[in-house]
């Protein structure tokens, strides 16, 4: 938890998914960082790496001042060779949770959720990663969250993300782990001297 006398920071979180901003805010605001959601659909290049997609999104938000954060996340299923991965949003729209469960029928269910968070502030552009291992449940459970949350059971838990509260998920998810790195990097940048040309 951030100390009461720590400097207050703020950043713009650019996303078309308000639930992602809400999850990020659970962790970042506990660290003393104000999150200002900016609802905007950003272009996503065809790439095999979350880091490249997040970097491209950050470039597309270059008009925003101050600290700016974007992210890209994906579900990587071991038995499917990492699919849907960077194509998770598209696969969810076309196959849905039920389609993923059909693909895994009879196969091992290990998976990993990953987030690439791209930050720009004080002349620095950096991508930080967060990941959480787990299993794909045999059926959808829970009504919270979004996307594949009803079928992902994080390591050490019996509940899916969708069976957890926003605070519970926000404390242990892949997104929370990426936000931990973001918080740490913001503190480092705040502490160092900055020139006028790098304040944007």
Image (cartoon, rainbow, N blue to C red):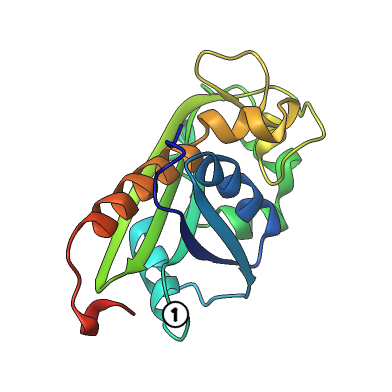
Identified at 41% across, 64% down, the residue is 54
- The image shows residue 166 at horizontal and vertical percentages of 69, 35
Identified at 59% across, 48% down, the residue is 25
Quadrant of the rendering where the C terminus is positioned = bottom left
Residue 152, quarter of picture: top right
Identified at 47% across, 39% down, the residue is 4
**Location of residue 145 with respect to 54 vertically, above or below:** above
Q: Look at the image and tell me whether residue 187 can be seen.
A: yes
Q: How many marks?
A: 1
Camera-nearest residue between 76 and 146: 146
The residue positioned farthest toward the front in the image shown: 5
Residue, disc 1: 65
Q: Look at the image and tell me whether residue 76 can be seen.
A: no
Identified at 51% across, 46% down, the residue is 28
**Location of residue 172 with respect to 146 vertically, above or below:** above
Q: Residues within 10 Å of mark 1 (few under 14, many from 20)?
A: few
- The image shows residue 136 at horizontal and vertical percentages of 60, 27
- The image shows residue 19 at horizontal and vertical percentages of 69, 52
- The image shows residue 67 at horizontal and vertical percentages of 41, 68
Residue 100, quarter of picture: top right
Camera-nearest residue between 40 and 3: 3
Seen in the image, is 69 located left or right of residue 22? Answer: left
Provide the secondary structure element on which disc 1 rests. Answer: loop
Camera-nearest residue between 124 and 43: 124
The residue positioned farthest toward the right in the image shown: 143
**Location of residue 79 with respect to 187 vertically, above or below:** above
């Amino acid at each position: 938890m951030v100390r009461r006398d720590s400097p207050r920071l703020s950043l713009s979180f650019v996303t078309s998914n308000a639930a992602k901003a809400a999850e990020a805010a659970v962790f970042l605001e506990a660290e003393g960082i104000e999150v200002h959601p900016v609802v905007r659909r950003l272009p996503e290049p065809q790439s095999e790496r979350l880091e490249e997609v997040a970097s491209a999104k950050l470039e597309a938000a270059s008009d925003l001042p101050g600290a700016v954060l974007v992210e890209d996340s994906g579900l990587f299923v071991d038995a499917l060779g990492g699919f849907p991965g960077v194509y998770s949003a598209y696969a969810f729209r076309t196959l849905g949770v039920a389609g993923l469960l059909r693909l895994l029928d009879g196969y091992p269910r290990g998976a990993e959720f990953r987030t690439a968070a791209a930050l720009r502030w004080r002349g620095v552009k950096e991508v930080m990663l967060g990941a959480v291992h787990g299993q794909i449940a045999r059926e959808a459970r829970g009504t919270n969250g979004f996307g594949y949350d009803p079928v992902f059971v994080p390591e050490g838990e019996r509940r899916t993300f969708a069976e957890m509260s926003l605070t519970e998920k926000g404390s242990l998810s892949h997104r929370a782990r990426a936000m931990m790195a973001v918080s740490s990097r913001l503190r480092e940048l705040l502490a160092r001297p900055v020139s006028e040309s790098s304040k944007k």
